[in-house]
Amino acid sequence: MKTKDVINLYNQFVMPTYTRTPLVPVKGKGMKVVDLHGKEFLDFFPGWAVSGLGHCHPEVVSAVRNQLKKIIHIPNNYYILQQAKLAREIINNSFPGKVFFCNSGAEAIESAIKLARAFGRPDRFEIISMEKSFHGRTLGALALTGQKKYQQGFEPMPQGFKCVEFGNLEALKKAITLRTCAVIIEPIQGEGGINVAPEEYLKALKKLCREKNILLIFDEIQTSMGRTGKFFYYQHSGVVPDAMTLAKSLGGGMPIGALVATEKIADLLTPGTHASTFGGSPVVCAAGLAVFRAIKKEKLLKNAKEMGSYLFEKLNILKQKCDIIKEVKGLGLMIGVELTIEGKHIVEACFEKGLLINCTQGNILRLMPALNVKKKDIDKMIKILKDVLADAV
């Protein structure tokens, strides 16, 4: 089959819920993917940050293959060995508490909503999120998302949600009422444009939540699993949330989500109050355990920090030579390159030259390479981007 044949199949049989790039990847290894016709691409946005170890990491492939030979699915009314081990691994590398497993980031957010309302009942049910946030596509997650464009056409939104300006503590104070049970924040807004929450703001946020007896929830779906140079972003600031949501890189390419809650509130979701049929299956949990092993064995937290600094340095050198670049922002390997022009055509031109990147908010190029990215990969990406930006002037 050719690319056009696959596109025709999609047009006939697949719902048109995505704006798709005409690429049919059939193989992937590390930082590279190969399409149906054998063309190779350098992937600096692998799976929207799902493939945090790159494509088909040997540790993950081996773990999944071995588990598939034994048992694929176990219902959650039994005990799943791999799930217990992965929960222990998450807690041992974060804060004391417990984990609920599901299949995606949106499901993790829905779980957090229910946990917050269980904490606040019977009278407190409102949850405050941030403008420009993105928490998912299910109705509850969509109601939390602070971008009206994603909500249009699906109103009315579920009730009990409100948004305030990201980083504005005074606005948050005014929004809190006797019905508020939680505040949720992405410590680095991904879809919102790689906006990093100031450390002092997070500390003040934690203090305010303690004073008001409301939960502080971190959406770490993009920032976790080493993306910023530590396993979880909160570890940079020392601000420990009451709960956090995980997904994306946790499964190394396999579909998994998780809600992590502190000991104080972890038992609020009791039998019968929440569930996930496929959540925490032996296969995806084996993959999650492999991700932790690979990060530790290959010292990928250190690499993310070092390569993040190197990438920032190279991008800032490019910025000095290119007026189109307004700002380089982010942390570790979660980087936004803000342009003075629309970014769509830049992404398309990079694609034609064999580089896969993303654009969000219209003019912010989003770079989230695998944690095991090397200098040679960064140098190649910079050369392509430099040529594309030069042609755009």
Image (tube, rainbow, N blue to C red):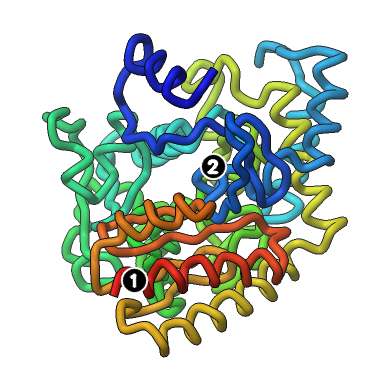
Instruction: Indicate whether 332 appears above or below 11.
Output: below
Q: Give percent across and percent down for residue 56.
A: 73, 38
Query: Could you give the CA–CA distance between mark 2 and mark 1, rounded to whole angstroms?
Result: 21 Å
Up the image or down, 198 lies above or below 252; here it is: below
- Mark 2 burial class by Cα count in 10 Å: few <14, some 14-19, many 20+: some
**Nearer-N-terminus badge (2/1):** 2
Q: Quadrant of the C terminus?
A: bottom left
Residue placed furthest toward the bottom = 320
SS label for mark 1: strand
Q: Nearer the viewer, residue 263 or 44?
A: 44
Q: Position of residue 184 (x, y in %)?
A: 37, 52
Q: In this view of the protein, which residue sits in the foreground, 198 or 326?
A: 326
Residue occupying the point 69% across, 75% down: 306
> What residue lies at 67% left-to-right and 33% top-to-bottom?
27
Q: Is residue 244 above or below residue 67?
A: below
Whether residue 89 is visible to the viewer of this picture, yes or no, is yes
- Circles 2 and 1: CB distance less than 8 Å? no
Looking at the rendered structure, the kind of residue marked 1 is Glu
Residue ID for mark 2: 47
Q: Which residue is mark 1?
A: 338
Expressed as whole percent of the image width and height from the top left, the position of residue 74 reads 72, 12
Binning the other alpha carbons within 10 Å of mark 1 as few (below 14), some (14 to 19) or many (20 upward) gives: many
Mark 2 residue type? Gly
Whether residue 243 can be seen here: no
Q: Which mark is residue 195?
A: none
Where residue 228 sits: x, y (%)?
59, 65
Q: Residue at x 56, y 15 (%)?
A: 277
Q: In front here: 49 or 267?
A: 49
